[in-house]
Amino acid sequence: MSGPKKTAYQIRQEEYQRRKELQADKRDMQIDEIESQISLCQKMTNTLLKEYGSMATTTKNRVDEWIDEIDKTGDLRYCFKALRGIESFIEKQKPLLKSRKKKQDIKREALEKEAEKKREHEAKIARVVSYLTSIEKEYKDILNDGIKQRVTLFKNAMRTNPDNQNTLKQIKSFKTNLHNTYEEHLEKVENTHYIADVLSEALGAKIQKSATGLLIDGSIDSVPISVKLNHNNNSLDLDTPMDGSCRRGLDALIKKLDRANIDLGAIKVVKTGQTINHAQTLKNIKVKA
């Protein structure tokens, strides 16, 4: 029985079938694992797309194309190799996308700051120009060529350089002076109307408007007296009779004004230059007599 021997073997069909079934089960488990990894890769790219928006579109498209190339009907080792490549590709894309997003955020922030600065710039111009434009309406009672010229100059200066501190300082001073002038004007108008009301009651006449102010044409103690008041100052002109009765009328009128806390200044007769005796000398009152 010694020496070399030769023989042959044959695997029984049952064993062969059993092993084929085991191989099929193993392949099915591998395909399930591949499907699971594919799903995971798709979730990862969707997350990148959600986080980085259009910047991640190329990454997602490349991964989708790579997944479509995976052939689960052939050698599964190539499938696993492709998936390892896909996962590695995705991991490498994460820091790149993060860096790109950071740069984009910085750029967007710079653009937003620039846009905000431009909006503030335009808003500042609009505010000041709006105020300057409103002057013609709000201060029409004291408007003159000088004010109009300054308004035009300030508008042009603001549109050219709204951050010029000298211009802004001049406009601020202009606003203050204009407001003060207007307040003084309103006070004069108020005073004029107050005196006009007193004179209207004293002379028994209605107040009439004239080109320069107000006119009251009536009488007191049977003495006809006409009074003109100017809006722009606290002077008044009196037109009285040529006879001696004017003195009686003026005395009566002065008493009426005195009771209303109004003092008349020295009364100057225009025709003769005579000054009618009166203690107060606030302003000259001209009398035509």
Image (cartoon, grey):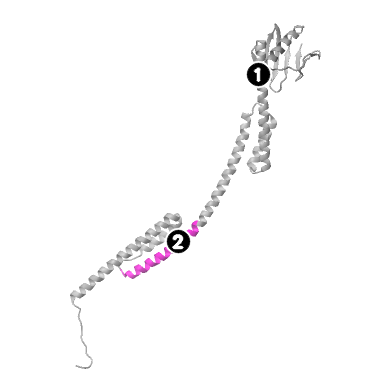
Foreground tag (1 vs 2)? 1
Examine the image and state in which quarter residue 246 appears: top right
Task: Pick the quarter of the image with the N terminus.
Answer: bottom left
Q: Which residue is mark 2?
A: 94
| Of 205 and 130, the residue lying toward us | 205
On whether residue 80 falls in the magenta region, the answer is yes
Query: Measured from the top left, where is residue 187 in percent x and y?
Result: 66, 24
Q: Residue 194: which numbered mark, if any?
A: 1
Bounds of the magenta span? 74-101
Image-based side of 96 in relation to 196, left or right: left
On whether residue 234 falls in the magenta region, the answer is no
- Dominant secondary structure of the magenta stretch? helix
- Report crowding for label 2: few under 14, some 14 to 19, many 20 or more residues within 10 A (C-alpha): some
Q: Amino acid at mark 1?
A: Tyr
Structural distance between the alpha carbons of marks 1 and 2: 83 Å
Q: Residue at x 41, y 61 (%)?
A: 62
Query: Measured from the top left, where is residue 258 in percent x and y?
Result: 70, 15
Query: Measured from the top left, where is residue 147 in percent x and y?
Result: 68, 32
Q: What SS does tag 1 mark?
A: helix
- Tell me which label, 1 or 2, sits earlier in the chain: 2
